[in-house]
Amino acid sequence: MRDSRQQARQRTLTALREELGDQVWVADNDREPFLREWRGRYHGNAAAVLCPGRTDQVALILQRCHQAGIAVVPQGGNTGLVGGAAPDASGEQIILSLCRMNRIRELDTENQTLTAEAGCVLADLQAAAADADCLFPLSLASEGSCQIGGNLASNAGGTNVLHYGNARELTLGLEVVLADGRVWQGLKALRKDNSGYSLKDLFIGSEGTLGIITAAVLRLFPAIRHRATSLLAIASPEHAITLLPLLREHGGDQLTACELMSRNSLLMATEHVAGCRDPFDAPHPWYLLVELSSSGNTAPTDLLTTALADANDRLLLRDAVLAQSLEQASALWRLRESIPEGQVRHGASIKHDISLPVSRLPAFLKQASQALEAQIPGIRLCPFGHVGDGNLHYNLSQPTGMDRAAFMDHEPDCNRLVFDLVHTLGGSIAAEHGVGQLRRQSLLEYKDPVELELMNAVKQALDPQGLLNPGKVI
Ligand SMILES: Cc1cc2nc3c(=O)[nH]c(=O)nc-3n(C[C@H](O)[C@H](O)[C@H](O)COP(=O)(O)OP(=O)(O)OC[C@H]3O[C@@H](n4cnc5c(N)ncnc54)[C@H](O)[C@@H]3O)c2cc1C
């Protein structure tokens, strides 16, 4: 039985190869990077790795796989952190990489839209928008590798969500290949469209389990002319939460970033990543990286200076540095963006990508740290994240001297403790990185049962054979 299934799969793939040509196939020797997730946590096998260059080729692949019962794992830049783009170990699934679908189909400055294929690298889209004197504001530390299709499939967040929203808010239309190979042509560039259910919102954030995104119409914004960037040293997360409305009051909608970093997370960058330097003379328990951006003629520096003076008068600041040049601003951002790399170099870490109502972040941080420090003496808590969005990367690094494996044995207990608390406080256990394989079991435990039923009904309607990215999300 197994043999005949294997033979049928092989026949289908051989026929597909003849129809599509060799350039769509990745040679066996070159497959390894597609099989492995970048952190090395997930490593699978695949019957084939295919890189189609056009939507009709994707459609043909899905049609044939649908007929033969072959599971398809879509893959973008493979920078996801939850094992969503990794195949299982069976060697029966195929990987469908969108990397060759990397054309910008249209950049329309009148309508302020950009229509791009799924395999376009995010940084290339940002650059294309900038060349047209526009801004595409989605921005993540992985932007040099991740692809817009992967960004949309995971509804990526990043550092500009505070002002511009997640990938979902930046998308007007989609082109999607369905499980049976039909193409949904939804590449509309409309700001308003209430003509029925918003199907694009089903596919955005579905992590490749409902359809393959092949192209998208994205929103553009006026290019940023001036930025004012400052690193604030503060006493506690409560101070960060009090500062947020104050910064909004002074900066209005020019407040584009507000990133919280604990002392430990800053140390991960300064101790382990070359070129990262603490700009303050003394250590501080918490830091807030703040940026105001303006597309007008006036720099927002005065607004930020006034906001900081006000904050200082209200005793909310321990210290502050205001970047005086683009280089200084980049150095401050480098501190924030080097934390994950520093953590990898420091040793083992247990990571959580959670969100909470902003006002509840301090309570969460206090209760979680007390419980974890009691459970694992010496644990290095390294929380940091997009505090303006209520999104924390609640990361735990191993105590100095502790065995790596012994620390990782604590992962299930740490997850339980963190997620129970997040759940009690009305938060989400998967804020911006998605569910993938990593949080699939936890989703079953913490998601509302009716919501899970509805999710299963949607999956059943769009992928009744369960061939799109099986083992991910639900
Ligand atoms: C250093 C670093 C920093 C990061 N910072 C952030 C951050 O600030 N914010 C954030 O949100 N994420 C962040 N991430 C996570 C990751 O970069 C994002 O999730 C990104 O959006 C994934 O894009 P990708 O192209 O690499 O997708 P992949 O990892 O290839 O895939 C992600 C998921 O989408 C599916 N998929 C991919 N392409 C398609 C498609 N065309 N159609 C349907 N399904 C598809 C895959 O099957 C998988 O389930 C970071 C990662 C790293 C390594």
Image (cartoon, helix red, strand yellow):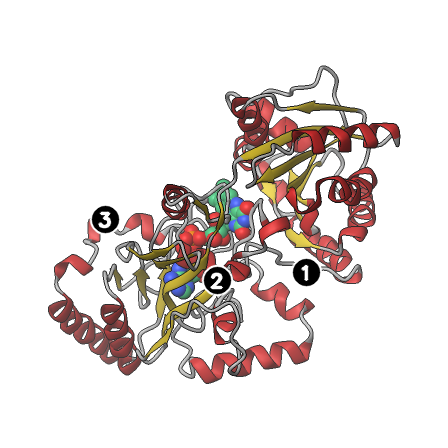
Give the residue pinned by disc 3: 30
Q: Position of residue 248 (x, y in %)?
A: 74, 44
Real-space CA distance between mark 3 and mark 1, rounded to the nearest whole angstrom: 38 Å
Name of the residue lying farthest toward the front: 297
Determine which quarter of the picture holds residue 17: bottom left
Q: Earlier in the sequence, mark 2 or mark 1?
A: 2
- Occupied quadrant, residue 313: top right
Q: Is 407 situated above or below 155?
A: above
Q: Badge 3 local density, few (<14 within 10 Å), some, or many (20+)?
A: few
Q: Are marks 3 and 2 in contact (CB under 8 Å)?
A: no
Closer to the chain start, of discs 3 and 1, is 3
Say whether residue 335 is left or right of residue 8: right
User: Residue drawn at (36%, 59%), measured in percent from left and top?
Assistant: 115
Beta carbon of the mark 2 residue lies under 8 A of ligand 1 = no
Question: Quadrant location of residue 282?
Answer: top right
Of discs 3 and 1, which sits in the foreground?
Answer: 1
Q: Label 2, label 1: how many angstroms apart (C-alpha)?
A: 23 Å
In the picture, measured across the screen, residue 125 lies left or right of residue 168, that is: left
**Which disc is residue 428 wearing?**
1
Q: Is residue 343 visible?
A: no
The label nearer to you, 3 versus 2, is: 2
Q: Residues within 10 Å of mark 2 (few under 14, many from 20)?
A: many
